[in-house]
Image (cartoon, rainbow, N blue to C red):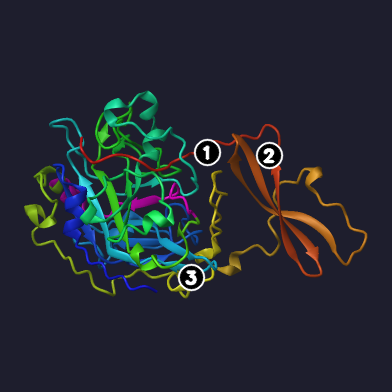
């Protein structure tokens, strides 16, 4: 592999991204506590369908809660009063021969806390104990808004719906500083390989979280409905019923894409997304809440956002997280490789380019002993989709559905049914059939886009 020789510093990244004035601090998380198929929000108590890069408190796991994180004995982030966990899907490069290779993550991750997002004098409330949320949608594979997206000054009502704001909350930006930088949240999808090859200082993946809270629920079924975006994404008015203003949380991760300039292939996220529209971020709060509130009230200077610049953090900064600050992997995936040259993405995730919504992922049980002995039979297939019985029993003897999922195509829901055929050499047949009449399902769609972090 081509060695990554480009040198860059965190300070340079921050300067080019946030040269507009803003009250914020940036929390360095220089190391991961793990790269694994663990997601206690979407796949609680199970093995996640896809792998994540995970930063923060090390008392993390498939059932992690805020209480668990607060009991961590170390964190991979720079403030010891913060045991929160921050995680996102990882970036891989798929070579022309179909193999996958993890792209090096440069400098860990940065978590930004913006506390100037309200009206003048409006209080910014600390994340409460037990709070968690997700931004983005792992299954999204297209951008549903008209492009180009207009400047904020020209936004109309349709540009400020929660769907529109969610699609503009993610970014993929090319770092080539000698030619000038790009704005944050300015590109809505992963660029193609030829463009990424010009990003010799790295490709920056970004996700911004909603900051308007209903003041009541610490989480919600989809980990999104208890929070909303303000109508200008970072600033502006909160929707009715969501008038508690939280800090704006923003993740930034840089990948060393220059390593792959001389190779043919494509970039793909660990959730099987080559488009970028399915990028997302997860957060579980592990702050000492009183300490976080004091920081939000005090750390209001406009500058580079260095944690050393705020007196509240004095005595609580450790930029050199210990190498052994890791969380314990479930035994089932303790030996699963997420790095090196791989024949498939971790979890054997299938690359789904869209544009239709990706099939519903399925978490795995923690222990093989909990798997059902017999296939889980889904709804009966329409008779037209059933293969006719063959004349020779040497071909197969019976056909039955073992799993189903759905996706949207041309405005219609389509069911993807996995059919098992009992044969001499067993095989699996995939049959796409229309959903049964009357069956409807709401699909939440989220994507990418946005603009510079100016109010």
Determine which of the numbered discs, if any, sits on residue 443 in the image.
1
Task: Bin the neighbour count of mark 3 within 10 Å (Cα to Cα): few under 14, some 14-19, many 20 and up.
Answer: some
Report if residue 293 lies within the magenta region. yes
The range drawn in magenta is: 273-294
Residue 319, x across and y down, in percent: 17, 65
User: Which of disc 3 and disc 2 is earlier in sequence?
Assistant: 3
Give the quarter of the image for residue 156: top left
Determine which of the numbered discs, if any, sits on residue 42 in the image.
none
Residue 341, x across and y down, in percent: 47, 73
Q: Residue at x 79, y 63 (%)?
A: 422
Q: Residues under labels 2 and 3: Cα distance?
A: 35 Å
Q: Is residue 380 toward the left or the right of residue 38 in the image?
A: right
User: Which of disc 1 and disc 3 is earlier in sequence?
Assistant: 3
Q: Nearer the viewer, mark 3 or mark 1?
A: 1
Q: Is residue 69 toward the left or the right of residue 416 in the image?
A: left
Circle 2 SS class? loop
Between 398 and 394, the one lying in front of the other is 394
The N terminus sits in image quarter: bottom left
Between 374 and 36, the one lying in front of the other is 36
Query: On the image, numbered disc 3 is attached to which residue?
Result: 333
Determine which of the numbered discs, if any, sits on residue 435 in the image.
2
Residue 17, x across and y down, in percent: 21, 49
| Residue 418 versus residue 451 in the image, above or below | below
Q: Residue at x 47, y 64 (%)?
A: 264
Residues at marks 2 and 3 touching, judged by CB atoms closer than 8 Å: no
Between 26 and 260, the one lying in front of the other is 260
Q: Is residue 78 toward the left or the right of residue 310 in the image?
A: right
Give the quarter of the image for residue 70: bottom left
């Amino acid at each position: 592999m081509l060695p990554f020789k480009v040198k860059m510093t965190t300070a340079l990244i921050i300067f080019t991204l946030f040269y507009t004035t803003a009250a914020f601090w940036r929390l360095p998380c220089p190391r991961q506590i793990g790269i694994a198929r663990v997601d206690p929000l979407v796949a609680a108590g199970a093995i996640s369908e896809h792998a994540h890069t995970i930063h923060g408190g090390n008392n993390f796991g498939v059932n992690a809660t805020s209480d668990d994180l607060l009991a961590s004995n170390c964190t991979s982030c720079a403030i010891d009063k913060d045991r929160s966990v921050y995680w996102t899907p990882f970036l891989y490069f798929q070579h022309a021969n179909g193999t996958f290779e993890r792209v090096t993550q440069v400098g860990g991750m940065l978590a930004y806390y913006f506390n100037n997002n309200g009206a003048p004098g409006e209080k910014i409330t600390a994340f409460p104990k037990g709070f968690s949320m997700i931004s983005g949608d792992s299954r999204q594979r297209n951008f549903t808004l008209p492009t180009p997206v207009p400047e904020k000054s020209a936004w109309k009502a349709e540009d400020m719906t929660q769907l529109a704001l969610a699609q503009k909350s993610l970014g993929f930006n090319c770092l080539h500083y000698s030619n000038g930088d790009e704005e944050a949240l300015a590109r809505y999808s992963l660029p193609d390989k030829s463009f990424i090859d010009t990003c010799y200082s790295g490709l920056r993946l970004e996700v911004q979280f909603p900051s308007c809270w209903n003041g009541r629920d610490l989480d919600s079924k989809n980990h999104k409905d208890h929070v909303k975006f303000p109508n200008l994404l970072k600033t502006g008015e909160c929707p009715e019923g969501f008038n508690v203003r939280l800090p704006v949380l923003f993740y930034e991760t840089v990948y060393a894409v220059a390593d792959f300039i001389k190779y043919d292939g494509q970039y793909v996220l660990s959730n099987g997304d080559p488009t970028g529209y399915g990028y997302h971020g997860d957060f579980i709060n592990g702050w000492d809440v009183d300490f976080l509130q004091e920081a939000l009230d005090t750390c209001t200077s406009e500058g580079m956002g260095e944690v050393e610049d705020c007196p509240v953090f004095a005595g609580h900064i450790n930029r050199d997280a210990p190498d052994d600050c890791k969380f314990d992997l479930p035994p089932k995936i303790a030996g699963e490789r997420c790095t090196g040259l791989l024949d498939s993405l971790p979890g054997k995730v299938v690359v789904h380019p869209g544009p239709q919504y990706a099939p519903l992922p399925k978490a795995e049980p923690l222990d093989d002993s909990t798997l059902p002995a017999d296939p889980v039979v889904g709804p009966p297939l329409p008779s037209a989709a059933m293969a006719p019985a063959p004349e020779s029993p040497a071909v197969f003897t019976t056909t039955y559905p073992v799993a189903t999922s759905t996706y949207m195509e041309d405005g219609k829901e389509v069911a993807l049914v996995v059919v098992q055929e009992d044969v001499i050499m067993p095989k699996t047949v995939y049959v796409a059939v229309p959903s049964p009449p009357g069956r409807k399902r709401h699909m939440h769609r989220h994507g990418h886009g946005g603009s510079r972090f100016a109010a």
